[in-house]
Image: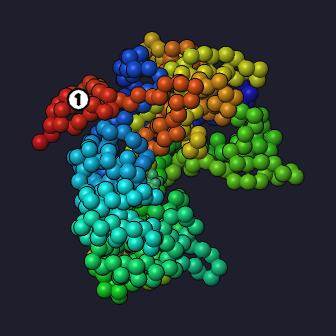
Amino acid sequence: MNTAGTGTGPLYLEPRLERRPAALLASGGPFLHALVAALGSPLNVVLPDQIAENVERFRAVFRARRLTGRIFFAHKANRSSALVRHLVTTDAALDAASLGELRHALASGWTGDRIMATGPKDPEFLWLAARTGATVNADGPGELERAAGLVRAYGLPRLRVVLRLSEFGTTGTTLLSRRSRFGTPAKSLKELLDTADRHRDALEPVGVGYHLDTTSPDEKAAALEGCLRAMEELYAHGFSPRAVDIGGGFGVSYLAHAEQWDRYTTELTRAVMGRRPPMTWGGHGYGLRMENGTVKGALGLYPAHRPLAGADYLDDLLSRPAPGLGGRPLGTLLLESLHELYVEPGRALVDQCGLTLGTVRDVRQAEGGEHLVTLAMNAGDAGLEDHGVLVDPVLLPRDGTPAEGRPATVYLMGNLCLEADLITRRAVHLPRLPHPGDLLAFPNTAGYCMDFGATRAQRQPLARRVAVFEEEGSWHWCLDEQYWPITRPGGPRT
Ligand SMILES: *Cc1c(COP(=O)(O)O)cnc(C)c1O
């Protein structure tokens, strides 16, 4: 019996896989099994060639709109060395959000002129950024003061700063962009400019920017328009800014089929209402709940199928009209003002760049007919659920034979001795029941879902990370920290 799928057939959430990861999963089963046999489960796999392809897609949007500017990879999405070392061979730049990320970038061949320092800044981080000629994405007047102090005290070159703004304009009573713990509210720009003015010898404001943690294009359009206005203020104060930095948040579409996502969320709502059997462990509602006969709350999930994501999302944003500036497209306004465009994609630049492998240890049937599948990994090793991303793993059978059998409904359990260690809180539908020794490949984990929240709890092993690449039709690998683009098989691309 298959309670979770009753009446509707399996509620698959099949991953969207582009050519490279699809080929690895389709033909690389024995290769991936050999890697896990040698290096253990869990195992993180990154695909450095893919990140270069993703940069090129963003660049194509710039080209098509005749915009110049920079594509900063938000390093925080993944700590891989292979990705960061491969990326330095492209025309991308890098956004470092900690001292550790900045040191990692410098040690991977990046130079300060291609780095922007963002996020909360310790004195050491701020000093090393200033020392190496990075641009500082400044949170507020206090940070400008501290930066200017360091520049003077250590005789450093004039520091380039981007003024980070937030909480852009209102129409009537509606706030056009949400509150943020970062940046300076746009209405307090004057204070920032006064501070920058007092430190003209030490600081060079090269532009203004924002990063909004939202998928809403309307909020981003309002923020971009707010930045265009702020640029005028900078000119009026005698500064010569050149760039508008629109941050990251271009997003990823994780699922292959919109219909599967629509059907899944519809059925989940019905399950919360008690109109169909539960689809989750303990009736978890992903933010939805029943109150006095009606559904309350909001679905706290990442929109796993997105019609517009990554470079396409950027293109769409640039084609949106600026309501307060004559309704002309934002991209056109940037071009006509001769502003450079800075973007800081994290998740979107590592789309399709990696996957996480876990070995099936144990399979047993539960009372409802579903199976409990325990993996040699835990919830921190594949943070898909933790980030609200629902996508099915791909089954890689142990002996390399094609998967066969009837569809199965399973809960994926972690290896911690903890009730809460569920890799999925939802019942997952698989084309067949996994067996011990099979691998489950969690697709597209490179953006935040790889080891952002991995722990050494219970002394379980942390996943190793390998870089995998294709040369002349076959797959090669090396440990992530051993990857240098110039010495991989196939050699330097000069
Ligand atoms: C996290 C972050 C990003 C990247 O966000 P994504 O959603 O991964 O694209 C970019 N800029 C800043 C300042 C960030 O904090």
Closer-to-camera residue (464/46): 464
Residue type, label 1: Glu
Depth check, front residue: 269 or 383: 383
Work out which residue is located at the far right of the displayed protein and give it: 292
- Nearer to us in this view, 15 or 197: 197
Is 429 situated left or right of 50 in this image? Answer: right
Q: How is the image coloured?
A: rainbow
Where residue 484 sits: x, y (%)?
23, 36
Residue 248 rendering spot, x and y as whole percentages: 43, 58
Q: At 52% from the left edge and 59% from the top edge, which residue is drawn?
A: 213
Mark 1 lies on a secondary structure that is strand
Quadrant containing the C terminus in the rendered view: top left
Q: Is residue 370 visible?
A: yes
Residue lying furthest front in this view?
153
Q: Which residue is depicted at the point 59% across and 39% down?
A: 385
Residue, far top: 399
Q: In the rendered view, would you say 469 is above or below 62?
A: above
State the residue position of label 1.
471
Q: Quadrant of the N terminus?
A: top right
Tell me, yes or no, if residue 69 can be seen here.
no
